[in-house]
Amino acid sequence: MTATRRTTIISAACLAVSMSACILLLRHIDQIRPKATIEDVLYLNSPTTIKRASVGFDGLMACIYWTRTVQYFGHRHFDRAHTYNELAPLLEITTTLDPHMLPAYQFGASFLAPKPPAGAGEPVRAIHLMEYGIANNPNNWRLYYDLGFVYYTELKDYRNAAEVFERGSKVPDAHPFMKIMAAQMAAHAGDFATARMLWSATYDSSNEENIRQNAVEHLRAIRVDEDVTNLETLVSAFESRVGRKPSSIAELATAAHLRGIPVDPDGDAYQIAPDGRVLVHDPDDFPFITKGLPEGYKPGPPKFHAQR
Amino acid sequence: MAAIEILGLEKTYMVGFWRKRPKRALQPLHLAVEEGEIFGFLGPNGAGKTTTLKMLMGLVFPTAGTARILGHDWTDPEVKAQIGFLPEQPYFYDYLTAHELLDYYGQLSGVPGKDRKRRVDEVLQRVGLQDIKGVQLRKFSKGMLQRAGIAQAILHNPKLVFFDEPMSGLDPLGRREVRDLMEQLKQEGKTVFFSTHILSDAEALCDRVAIIHRGELRGVGAVEDLTATVQGKVEVIWQGAQIPASMKALGAECHVTGDTVRAVLPENQQDAAIDALRREHIRLIAITPLRTSLETYFVEKLQTASSETPAASAAGKTLGTAV
Amino acid sequence: MSPRIVYIAFNTFREAVRDRVLYNLIAFALLLSGAAIFVGQISIDIERLVVVNLGLTAVSLFGIVIAIFIGIGLVSKEIEKRTLYTVLSRPVRRWEFIVGKFFGLAGTLVVNTFFMAIGVFGALLYVVHKFSKPDALILVALYFIVLEFLIICSLALLFSSFSSPLLSAVFAFSLFVIGSFADDLRGFAAMAHGLTRWVATGAAYLVPNFSALNVISAVAHQQPVSGQLILNNTLYAMFYTAMALSGAVLIFERRNLK
């Protein structure tokens, strides 16, 4: 074998081995550094500093920070984390670098305000973020929607929500829906119908995976809450008529002339507890329900559903 | 043992924008060089001389063919310890001094540490580079660089030396020194293979030559044999501007240059010419038999059509084609 | 193993020194002393932060620039100037040439970094007047920076073996920038679909992972660096360098030198 031949074979083998080793080591290193991409945010969470450090490449840096935000949130949300301390700084940095990055505001609206593990639990910062977005994009009705959304869902401040929806409806090319929501807020804020409208709008108008999943869960929860409320009304009616609580859901269904056994969005029948409460078959499937939960219920690991 | 055996080395380059057009730099070459001889590789510029040398050095890879150097495969790295190479218009690391350069090359050629310093000094003396200690190569003149180049080629006492245009850039004194050096190398039993387009050097130095043109070998043979043909004429040179009347009768062609006359006449008239000069009391300067110069042979080979060359290649190593 | 690699490495180092590369240390020293004095006067509680961040970033950037500018010419300059002819006509193997050049350049950078490290510690001492134990972490950051240099040197050498100096500089510099965002690139790849995902993932794994080697912020805040990370980074840098050098050897072995 000539010297050249031997060298070629050895270097080719070396190349293959090194390449594989590099890839394996990289994966290992990723595991050692879970906070990798948001490291700078830990140390450098001043948006103005980062803007200066970007030396003019603000747009690109905004995209990079946006990607990091989504990844950061996705990983923690999946693990049902108890804190999202870096979410607000990440979003603030992203929007400082690019004030017109609308998806960032949407994301903030959905996930900054709610309490952990659903979100970062920082409604005030969320409001600030939205107001900042509106200030920089005054003709975008969507941002008014996002702000109103925060007031409505998290702060339950229906007056301010109505006012914001009203402001937003005046923007040129605003969706007619805004005016409707303004009216709904004013009169029927606590209604299931209003909530359903809002969450449907959020689902329809977003392309972001996390936001849509979140909206789906809320819509399912509204369905369940509605069903349970109605069923409990029926249980009270049954009790006052028959003098006792219904023994089973089937008995209630027959007595109330319902069309079949009432089922939850997963197709599982509701159950009647001995004390007359209506319970959902598997509460873990419905993260946001406020009714139909058994005593002392503690949520388990999250399950995500893609369909409404 | 043949010092160099070239067995069908050939090189085709792909040129053009898409690298599709083949350009033949060297046709399959068959050549052998014996140990201890000075071999001249002649040809005009662009003939393929440098390409051949680069292939033998392993700088360029042949499209086909092989070669043997000192009995080993030409790609064997160890054989390089026994050869020296002077490229055309060499360029060296200009931030080094000549001593540092040669020491570095000595290291790479495997000259042991304790010998190196001594050998470097010796070889620099030999090529006529003295008093250049501490001077960086970037300050060397062309002639000095050429000498340094020769120095690095012979530093490690190789058995076989390759020179590519060794005389280029040298003044007449320098060229004489290089010629003397090459003779010395031959005396030391080394083989010298050098390429040049200057025929007078080749004629003076070489035992054998090969002529290459446009990538094809056009002729090979011992210089003596190639220039052996005697034209049957002699050249007579005498003092003065006078031409004896009888000269013309002898069939001489005379040329007056300054205060000498040069006449060419048939060999058998040589004695008659001498008598004529003596009768006129004209002083004879020289009588020389005329031989075909290498130049004539060279030009003739260059003009030969390609179709004749297979015969030339097949003639192989010893006798050349008929002149 | 023959000592030829050592000889070639030493000659490469000598070339860099005579090329006045080490003069960059003067610019570095001026920059750092200026910053230290400036910061010492302002005294707003972040002197240490500024000196460490600025010092280490400067070491990194100066070194990368030197690595690229010398590295890109390592092979192509020798071919262009034909200094390679007389080297390769000796019993030097082509792969020895590549490896020797690499060690020469890497050695130059290590020496350069050594002097710069003294400068950083000097400036730090000036502003904080006394070293504390976590300052030893600066050595870890410097070690990682040296690993970065090894990778960049090998890449510059790889490009130099087949490409012109200008293109090599562009490639090497691009890979440095992309490599600094390697984590994000893997993030992008994870979010993509289909063919883009495969291509992006492939690229993300081939690009040198400089983000893992950059612990400047952490060290400036006196955060510890795990021993596991040090080990893995060392192995990664070794293998990456081996990969790039193997590539360079494979290419150079086949190259016809005009």
Image (cartoon, coloured by chain):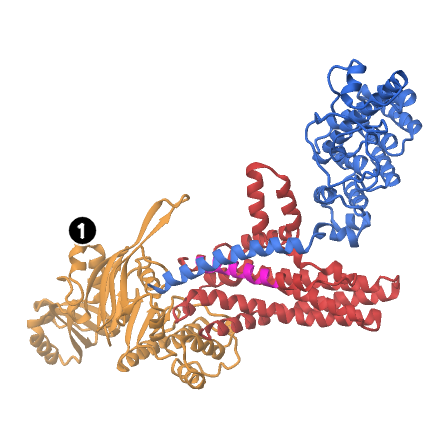
Splitting the image into 4 quarters, where does residue A132 fall?
top right
Residue B262 coordinates in the image, percent (x, y): 19, 71
> Is the magenta region chiefly helix, strand or loop?
helix
Query: Which quadrant: the C terminus of chain C?
Result: bottom left
Left/right placement of residue B218 relative to residue A189 reads left
Residue B123, above or below B3 = below
Splitting the image into 4 quarters, where does residue B39 fall?
bottom left
Is residue C83 visible in the rendered structure shown here? no
Q: Which residue is drawn at the image coordinates 46% and 70% (left, top)?
A: B92
Left/right placement of residue C120 relative to residue B267 reads right
Magenta stretch, residue numbers: C234-250
Residue C237 in magenta stretch = yes
Left/right placement of residue A181 relative to residue A26 reads right
Residue A192 in magenta stretch = no
Colour displayed for chain C in the image of the structure: red
Splitting the image into 4 quarters, where does residue A307 fall?
top right
Q: Which chain is orange?
A: B
Q: Which chain is blue?
A: A
Residue extending furthest toward the right: A159
Number of marks: 1
| Local crowd size for mark 1, using a 10 Å CA cut-off: few (<14), some (14–19), many (≥20) | few
Query: C99 or C88: nearer the eye?
Result: C99
The amino acid beneath tag 1 is Ser
Describe the element under mark 1 as helix, strand or loop.
Answer: helix
The residue where tag 1 is placed is: B307
Residue B293 coordinates in the image, percent (x, y): 20, 67
Residue B272, above or below A18 = below
